[in-house]
Image: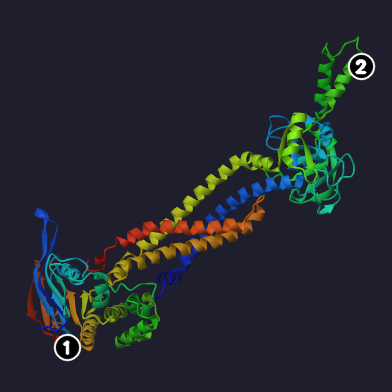
C-alpha cells in the first residue's frame, strides 16, 4: 500500500448532461508510491488529459476519491478549499513543451513557484540552484529560456516541477518534442528525481521509445485503466 | 517576490520603448492642445494686464472693444475724467490687420494710443529695446513676436511708420502681436480710404443737391471735411484713484454718460467665456479625440501583448499564481507604457511648443493632471486584457 504518493479510487468525469453527456472517465483506480515513476499510456481521446486535469485539480471530477499523501483531497467533491494553493504547494507539473516564462531567467523560472508561495527570493533561488545543479543545468542559471536547447529547457521545466518538493508530479508527454536519446535522458532524470526527493511521478505518454522504461504502466482506454507490469528496461 | 511586469518590460524593452514613444507623441499633441488653450487664456489676461486699465468704457449694448466692434466719440474721455474716482482716462483704438514690412506682411493688432506718455492706459508697460512713442505721427512700438527690428519701416494703409521701440508679450486674445501707433494715425487708419474712393466720394457729395447748395457757400467743403475725419475711438481706458471701488465708478460713468462700462473681471469673462469659448470647445474636442485614440492604442497594445502570453498565463495559473498577480502584471505594464508615453509627451510638448506660431503655455498643474489622466486611462485600458487573461483556463497548459 501507498503511505504517501497518490491514490485514486473510482474516479469518474462526465462532460455535459442528458443525451449529450460524455463519460470521459468511467472509474479510474490508480496508485503511485513515493519514489515511483509510472507510465499512463493510451491513444488520443482515451481520457489521459482529462485524468491529468482531474489529478492536477484543474477540473473537478464527477465522482470518486483522490488521496494525496495522507490527505483526502477529493471524495465526491473537493475536500480542500484552496485548489490554487494545492496546485502550487503539493503538485508539480511538467508539460509537453517546457512553457518556461520567456522573460525570466532559468533560476527565476524555477524559483518563481516558491516566490509565489511567499518564500524569500534568496531562499527560493538557492533551492532553484540546487535543483538546477542536480539536473546538470546549473551552468545555464542566468540564461534566458530562448538561449537553451530543447533538452535543457525540459530539464529546467522538471526542476520547476520539483522545486516545491511536491508529493506528486504530473508529467504530460514530457518527451514528445525530444529525440530518443534525449527522451530517455529525461525519463532517467525523472526516475532519479523521484527517488532522490521521494516523489510519485505519473508520466502521460504515447511515446513508444520510453514505454519500455516504466516498471509499471497504466493503460487507459475509453475512460478505464488497466494496470500492467512494465519492463523497466533502462533502469535495471 | 520579483516584479513580473518589470522583467517582461526589460525582456521586451524595445517593443515597450518604441510603443511608448508613439504613445508619447500622441500625449505630447494632447499636452500641446491644452497648452494652446492655456496660451489663449493667458494672452487674453496679459492683454488686459498690459492695458493698465481698471475700467473699459465702450459703446452701449456692445461687448467691445475686443469681442465686438465699439465706437464712441473721441472727446468722451474728457467728461469721464471729471467723474469722481477716475485718475486717468485715455482713448484707444484696436484694429487687426496685415502690416507690411518690405516684401512680407504680418498679422498684428494695431493699437492707437494717446500721446500722453508712458503710464497712460493703453501704452505698452515696458520695452525690451528702443524707446516709447514721442512723436504724434508715424512712430511705432512693436511686439518682438512680429519679427520687426528697431528702425524697420512699416506700412500701415498708405503711411510709413518707423519702429522706435520693441516690447514683449503684448498680444491680442487671438495671439496676434500688437503694434502701437499714435491715436490720430490709428483713427485715420481705421477709416482711411484710397485716393480713388475719396475722389468718387467727393463727386457723389458734390452731386447731392442737399449738400451742394449754391446759396450756402462753404457747406460742401464742411461736409467733405467731416467725411474725411474720424472722431471715433473704440474705447476709453480708465484708471481709478486709490480707494475707489470699480463698481461705483463704473455705475457713475454708465449712468451719466450712457455708455457701457466693464471692470476687469467682466472683461476677463468676456474674453475667456465668450471670445475664445468656441476655440476652447474646439480644442476640447481635439483633446477628447486624442485621449480616446491614446486609450485605444494602450488597450490594443496591452491586449496584444497579453494574448501573446496566453500559454504562459495558463502555466502561471496552473502552478498557483493568484489572479491578482496576473492582473498586476498586465496593469503594471499598461501603467509603465503610459509613464513612458507621459515622459516622452511632456518632453516633446516642451521642445516643440516654442515653435508654434501662437503662445503655448504648459502649466505644471496640467502636467500633473495629465499624469493622473494617463495612469487612469492606462488602468482602464488594461481592463480588457486583464479580463481576457483571467478567463484563461489553466487547463490549457495541459494536453492538446
Helix, strand or loop at label 2? It is loop
Label 2 neighbourhood size at 10 Å, few (<14), some (14-19), many (20+)?
A: few
User: Dot 2 corresponds to which residue?
Assistant: B218
Q: Is residue A60 above or below residue A19?
A: below
Please provide percent x and percent y for residue B46.
71, 48
Q: CA distance from mark 2 to mark 1?
A: 134 Å
Residues at discs 2 and 1 in contact (Cβ within 8 Å): no
Is residue A175 or residue B50 the one in the foreground? B50
Label 1 neighbourhood size at 10 Å, few (<14), some (14-19), many (20+)?
A: few
**Chain containing the residue with disc 2:** B
Work out which residue is located at the far bottom of the displayed protein and give it: A236
**Picture colour scheme:** rainbow
**In this orientation, does residue A73 appear?**
yes
Does mark 1 fall on the same chain as mark 2?
Answer: no
Q: Is residue B368 left or right of residue B317?
A: right
Which quarter of the image is occupied by the C terminus of chain A? bottom left
Residue at 58% x, 51% y is B34
Please provide percent x and percent y for residue B125.
80, 49
Q: Is residue B104 left or right of residue A86?
A: right
**Chain containing the residue with disc 1:** A
User: Dot 1 corresponds to which residue?
Assistant: A235
**In this orientation, does residue A137 appear?**
no
Quadrant of the image occupied by residue B240: top right
Quadrant of the image occupied by residue A194: bottom left
Is residue B284 or residue A52 the one in the foreground? B284
Q: Is residue B48 above or below residue A4?
A: above
Is residue A186 or residue B239 the one in the foreground? B239
**How many numbered circles are shown?**
2
Residue at 39% x, 83% y is A122
Amino acid at each position: 500500500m501507498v503511505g504517501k504518493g497518490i491514490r485514486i479510487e473510482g474516479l469518474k468525469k462526465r462532460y455535459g448532461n442528458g443525451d449529450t453527456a460524455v463519460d470521459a472517465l468511467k472509474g479510474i483506480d490508480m496508485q503511485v508510491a513515493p519514489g515511483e515513476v509510472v507510465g499512463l499510456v493510451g491513444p488520443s481521446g482515451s481520457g489521459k488529459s482529462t485524468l491529468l486535469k482531474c489529478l492536477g485539480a484543474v477540473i473537478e471530477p464527477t465522482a470518486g476519491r483522490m488521496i494525496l499523501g495522507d490527505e483526502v483531497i477529493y471524495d465526491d467533491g473537493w475536500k480542500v478549499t484552496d485548489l490554487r494553493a494545492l496546485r502550487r504547494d503539493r503538485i508539480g507539473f511538467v508539460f509537453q513543451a517546457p512553457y518556461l516564462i520567456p522573460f525570466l531567467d532559468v533560476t527565476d523560472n524555477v524559483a518563481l513557484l516558491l516566490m509565489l508561495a511567499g518564500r524569500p527570493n534568496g531562499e527560493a533561488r538557492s533551492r532553484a540552484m540546487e535543483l538546477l545543479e542536480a539536473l546538470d543545468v546549473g551552468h545555464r542559471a542566468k540564461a534566458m529560456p530562448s538561449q537553451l536547447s530543447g533538452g535543457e529547457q525540459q530539464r529546467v521545466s522538471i526542476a520547476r516541477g520539483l522545486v516545491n518538493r511536491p508529493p506528486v508530479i504530473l508529467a504530460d508527454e514530457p518527451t514528445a518534442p525530444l529525440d530518443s536519446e534525449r527522451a530517455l535522458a529525461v525519463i532517467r532524470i525523472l526516475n532519479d528525481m523521484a527517488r532522490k526527493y521521494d516523489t510519485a511521478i505519473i508520466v502521460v505518454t504515447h511515446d513508444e521509445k520510453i514505454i519500455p522504461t516504466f516498471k509499471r504502466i497504466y493503460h487507459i482506454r475509453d475512460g478505464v485503466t488497466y494496470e500492467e507490469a512494465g519492463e523497466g528496461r533502462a533502469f535495471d | 517576490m520579483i516584479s513580473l511586469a518589470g522583467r517582461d518590460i526589460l525582456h521586451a524593452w524595445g517593443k515597450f520603448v518604441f510603443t511608448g514613444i508613439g504613445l508619447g507623441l500622441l500625449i505630447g499633441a494632447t499636452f500641446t492642445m491644452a497648452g494652446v488653450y492655456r496660451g489663449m487664456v493667458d494672452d487674453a489676461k496679459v492683454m488686459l494686464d498690459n492695458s493698465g486699465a481698471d475700467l473699459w468704457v465702450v459703446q452701449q449694448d456692445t461687448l467691445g472693444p475686443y469681442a465686438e466692434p465699439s465706437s464712441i466719440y473721441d472727446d468722451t474721455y474728457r467728461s469721464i475724467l471729471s467723474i469722481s474716482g477716475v485718475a486717468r482716462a485715455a482713448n484707444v483704438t484696436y484694429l487687426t490687420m496685415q502690416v507690411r514690412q518690405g516684401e512680407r506682411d504680418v498679422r498684428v493688432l494695431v493699437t492707437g494710443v494717446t500721446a500722453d506718455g508712458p503710464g497712460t492706459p493703453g501704452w505698452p508697460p515696458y520695452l525690451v529695446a528702443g524707446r516709447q512713442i514721442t512723436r504724434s505721427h508715424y512712430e511705432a512700438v512693436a511686439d518682438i513676436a512680429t519679427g520687426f527690428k528697431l528702425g524697420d519701416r512699416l506700412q500701415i494703409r498708405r503711411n510709413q511708420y518707423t519702429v522706435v521701440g520693441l516690447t514683449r508679450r503684448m498680444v491680442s486674445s487671438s495671439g496676434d502681436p500688437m503694434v502701437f501707433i499714435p491715436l490720430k494715425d490709428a483713427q485715420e487708419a481705421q477709416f482711411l480710404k484710397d485716393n480713388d474712393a475719396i475722389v468718387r466720394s467727393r463727386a457723389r457729395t458734390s452731386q447731392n443737391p442737399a449738400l451742394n447748395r449754391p446759396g450756402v457757400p462753404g457747406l460742401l467743403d464742411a461736409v467733405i471735411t467731416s467725411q474725411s475725419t474720424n472722431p471715433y475711438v473704440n474705447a476709453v481706458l480708465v484708471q481709478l484713484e486709490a480707494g475707489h471701488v470699480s463698481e461705483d465708478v463704473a455705475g457713475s460713468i454708465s449712468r451719466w454718460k450712457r455708455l457701457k462700462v466693464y471692470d476687469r473681471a467682466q472683461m476677463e469673462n468676456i474674453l475667456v467665456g465668450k471670445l475664445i469659448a468656441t476655440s476652447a470647445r474646439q480644442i476640447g474636442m481635439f483633446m477628447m479625440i486624442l485621449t480616446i485614440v491614446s486609450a485605444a492604442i494602450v488597450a490594443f497594445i496591452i491586449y496584444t501583448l497579453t494574448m501573446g502570453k496566453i500559454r504562459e498565463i495558463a502555466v502561471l495559473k496552473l502552478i498557483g499564481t493568484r489572479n491578482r498577480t496576473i492582473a498586476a502584471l498586465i496593469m503594471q505594464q499598461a501603467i509603465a507604457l503610459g509613464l513612458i508615453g507621459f515622459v516622452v509627451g511632456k518632453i516633446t510638448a516642451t521642445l516643440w511648443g516654442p515653435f508654434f506660431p501662437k503662445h503655448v503655455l504648459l502649466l505644471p498643474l496640467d502636467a500633473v493632471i495629465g499624469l493622473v489622466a494617463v495612469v487612469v486611462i492606462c488602468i482602464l485600458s488594461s481592463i480588457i486584457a486583464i479580463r481576457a487573461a483571467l478567463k484563461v483556463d489553466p487547463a490549457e497548459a495541459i494536453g492538446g
